[in-house]
Image (spheres, rainbow, N blue to C red):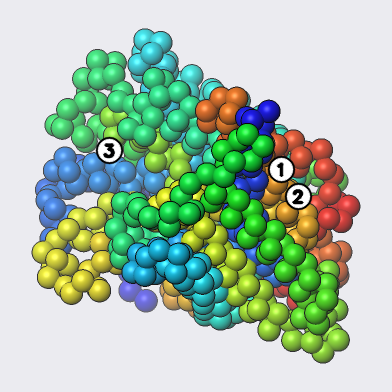
Amino acid sequence: MTTVILLTATGLGLAALYFLVASGLSLIFGLMDVLNFAHGAFVAIGGYVGWTVADQLGGTLGLFGALLAGIASGAAAAFLTEQVIIRPLYRRKLDQVLATVGLGLAIPALLQAIWGADARTWVLPGWLAGTVQLAGARVPTVRLVLIGVAVGLLVALRLLLTRSRAGLIVRAGVEDREMVTALGIDVRRANAAVFALGGAAAGLAGALFGLYQGSVSPGDGTSLLIYAFVVVVLGDAGSITGTAYAAVAVGLVQQYADYASASLGDESVVVLLAAVLLLRRRNLQGRPA
Amino acid sequence: MNRVTMLWARGPLASRWVRAALVFAVLYALPYSTAQIPGVFDGPFDAPGVLQLLAVCLVFAGLAIGYDLLFGHTGVMSFGHGMFVTTGMYATTILVDHAGYGLWISAAAGLGIALVAAVVLGGVALRVGGIGFAMVTLAFGQAVSIFVVSGSPQLTGGEQGQTLNSSAVPAALSGVRNTANLYWIALAYLAVCALVVWGLSASMPGRVMRALRENERRVEVLGLNPYLFKLLAFTVAGVLAAGGGIVYLLLLGGATPTVADSNFTLSLLVMVVLGGAGRRWGAIVGGIIYGYASQSLTRVSGSSAVAGLPGVLRGPLEQPLFLLGAAFVLVVFFAPGGLAGRIAAMTRTGAGIGAGTGAAAARTGAGIGKGATGRGAEAVSGAATVTGATAGTGGAAGSGAGTKEAR
């Protein structure tokens, strides 16, 4: 029983990270049809900027500073990417994807040039470094923080998408971009906003991934990105709730399979993806194929 | 027009096959040359170091042209191509090292395993289209990568890779003095890849593949099964990749897990786009440039000229991936047809430029978004797309894709 609780808690912690990265990817893909390979780079930027702030300030203040800095740097990087790289390639969908592939290669290399190839250790404040007793299981506190942040983001995104005018435009854009444009609404502003929002979530994920691992390294974002892609595909692009369900499924499957046998976790995620894609006879937009 | 240009435009040299044979003849003769190109290569062409560098370039070019069959010719974007390189490389190494078979038998078995793997994985993955296919292949590639790095270290050597048992390698292929033989094997591999891809693209299946790139639904309407042709392209590309893995294994003297990394497949994509997707020489040029750059940039970055620069400049210049990634973004922005497209546009007159932009537009249309799979295909009207699907020629295809984009 203790093991089940522990595995579930850690699995949900992993799922929280996946959700943070995948929610932005999913909205960007749903709205703009751009599979953003640079998203992992935003994660890495958030991680390194957050680490620098935490390292300078130290303690609990440094921790909150790091999270805010991660959000800000991720949002800024994503906004710049949209303005400088994505927007000029309007109507060249494939080239947009290819350009993000180039960024996804260049930015981690740049981070490596600045901060070095070796992982930087992230010293956690005392209250965060320990564990919490949960029905007999000792769950690392960081996992619970991750879960709390992800649930908060889920609620905030849901409210934003369903209760605000901007959210209405984004949802309508996901459904039918041409129709929204025809109604006289400038979808490009929604594009920039969604990119910045996704980048903010990715930057936050980068900082939290640093806490989760206790270190940051240049390849962090890329390793998260592949699972985030899996989550996006499983969860129907453009749907935040679907992304959340898919993140939980992937996180739990990975943790339980890893418990059964080391390195089985990653393989089982692949099997899960293949099985779902083959059984679900629908395309990615959730419409019948 | 003087006699030389006459010969180029009208004489026997006008045949593309003769020109290709000439290029390969020059490449074949390189190890006999003692010419030096200062600044580009460390020594004369017959120096082992230079030959080794060139051989890796040729292997990359062969891998790139195989990937181009999928990406440039058929419009199928696979993010798991590296897994076939890995299959060829590791199957051969494991059979030699752990089962004690001879090198050539193991290599043949490696190709066979890759063939079966390509048919099975392609058969599964191609049942989903567009972005789903990209994701499934990415996930498969990741699974292979994880198995190679941490699945069973005693079999694959984990992160360190696995050295090929040197007693199984023929004497003519081992030792620094025999680097020329390895170079010729790499050249032969590139020639085989080029012949297969060029031959296939000139045949009926190749024309159907190009039509698939432009408009899959039209091909279905014509009564052809897109699935089978995509599977053919996927399988041929997979077996060619496995062959490349085996040649790369011989060059390195051991298997390395870098080929299983998702970045390796992305670098194949970079090579193809850099050179020009779907073009005769594009992938080869891109592969050679990428191979040269990825090996030489580390040397350049270690040089004293870079070490003298201030830290802000020096840091990024020491990262080959940063330079390649940045160059890739620039090519996507300013030379959508790749380098081959640029050259074609510069050397030819108006018609050539038209075809170049047509191909660029076609590549955009072959994208992986909704436009390529769903509503876009229905929204297309007019005969332009029908010609695009049946004839599959550059210009007509370009206009077909243009219609699709303008929906």
Residue A249 marker: 1
Disc 3: which residue = B183
Residue pictured at 14% horizontal, 31% vertical: B177
What chain is tagged by disc 1? A
Relative horizontal placement of residue B179, taking residue A2 as reference (left or right) = left
Asked if residue A118 shows in the view, the reply is yes
Give above or below for B177 relative to B310: above
Relative horizontal placement of residue A253, taking residue B281 as reference (left or right) = right
Residue pictured at 50% horizontal, 30% vertical: B147
Estimate the x, y position of residue B57 in percent, counting from the top left: 33, 48
Instruction: Please tell me in which quadrant of the rendered image residue A271 appears.
Output: top right
Q: Nearer the viewer, residue B277 or B159?
A: B159
Disc 1 residue type (three-letter)? Ala
Q: Separation of disc 1 and disc 2 at Cα?
A: 6 Å
Asked if residue A270 shows in the view, the reply is no
Q: Separation of disc 3 and disc 1 at Cα?
A: 49 Å
Label 3 crowd (10 A; few <14 / some 14-19 / many >=20): many
Secondary structure at badge 3 equals helix
Q: Are marks 3 and 2 on the same chain?
A: no
Disc 2: which residue = A245
Give above or below for A246 relative to B3: above
